[in-house]
Image (cartoon, rainbow, N blue to C red):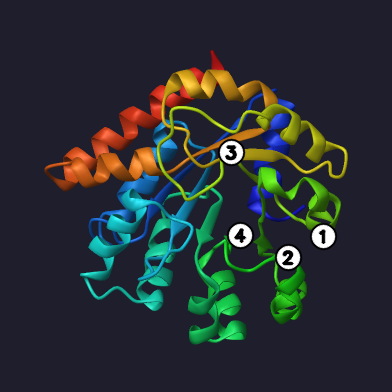
Amino acid sequence: MSNRIDRKFAELKEKNRKALITFITAGDPDLSVTPRLVKAMEDGGADIIEMGIPYSDPIAEGPVIQAASARALKNKIRIDDIFTCVKEIRKITGIPLVFLLYYNCIFKYGKEKFFEECSKAGVDGLIIPDLPCEERVDINDMLTASDIEVITLIAPTSNNRIERVVKDARGFIYCVSSLGVTGIRAEFHKDLSNFISKIREYTGLPRAIGFGISTPEQVRELRSIAEGLIVGSAIVKKIGEAGSDEEAVQSVRNYVAELREAMDN
């Protein structure tokens, strides 16, 4: 068990705690601020951090994260710049880091080179929304040769495919709370609890619920039915609304601390 994601979930299980997984877009508002935001989230109580790779057509993302991608792309950000940023992050924290990106980014960069650079920089996992588990054959060799975990996403509409989807899953299962794209929501899929319970029939991996969680009240509502909760758009929104880099860092730290408090108490 050498991957940081596996170690983190094992550590949390020992302490009877749930994982708080937070998301930002790399390079939003500027790549120099990204390491500070990562540290702010860790200081606030995040256990695992997802970093979105800015992309011009993020099909799974709602308007908040689309706007963050647009802000980052204005700075002419490249994937090599993000790898350099991760190396800087690794100088200040060992928190598990997961890239969320689209398969075209990997394909255009070069699959083998991409996985090599992930390993060198210290990336622990990948979430690739547009790469179904049945089509991972293209990267299976790279997965076998590396310790990087591709996280499996599963939605409430996948009830009849759960066993097949989770068969070779690693790290944790990303359980999509609602239909549609990412974004802040007032309510979740009506059968969410049953859906999460059914996943347990087919895998012992930790389950983390994402898409739409934004308030401490929602954290308290959902924390009992899964091993982790994922918060993204609400954090990205705070970054977009901040008047300065310092305000963004402070706002994110305080907000994540509120979520941690709700997760634990």
N-term mark: 1 or 2 = 2
The quadrant in which residue 252 appears is top left
What percent of the width, then of the height, locates residue 160?
82, 49
Would residue 108 appear left or right of 81 to someone viewing this image? right
Of badges 4 and 1, nearer the viewer stands: 1
Mark 1: amino acid? Asp
Q: Report, in whole angstroms, how far the alpha carbon at label 3 lies from the one at label 1.
A: 22 Å
Tag 3 residue: 177
At 66% from the left and 47% from the top, the residue drawn is: 155
Asked whether residue 93 appears in the rendered view, the answer is: yes
Q: Secondary structure at mark 1?
A: loop
Of badges 1 and 2, nearer the viewer stands: 2
Asked whether residue 40 appears in the rendered view, the answer is: no
Mark 4: amino acid? Gly
Tag 2 residue: 133
Would residue 261 appear left or right of 31 to someone viewing this image? right
N-term mark: 3 or 2 = 2
Q: Report, in whole angstroms, how far the alpha carbon at label 4 lies from the one at label 1.
A: 15 Å
What percent of the width, then of the height, locates residue 138?
71, 81
Mark 2: amino acid? Cys
Mark 3: amino acid? Ser
Tag 1 residue: 168
Q: Secondary structure at mark 2?
A: helix
Of badges 4 and 3, nearer the viewer stands: 3
N-term mark: 4 or 3 = 4
Q: How many C-alpha atoms fall within 10 Å of the one at disc 3: few (<14), some, or many (≥20)?
A: many
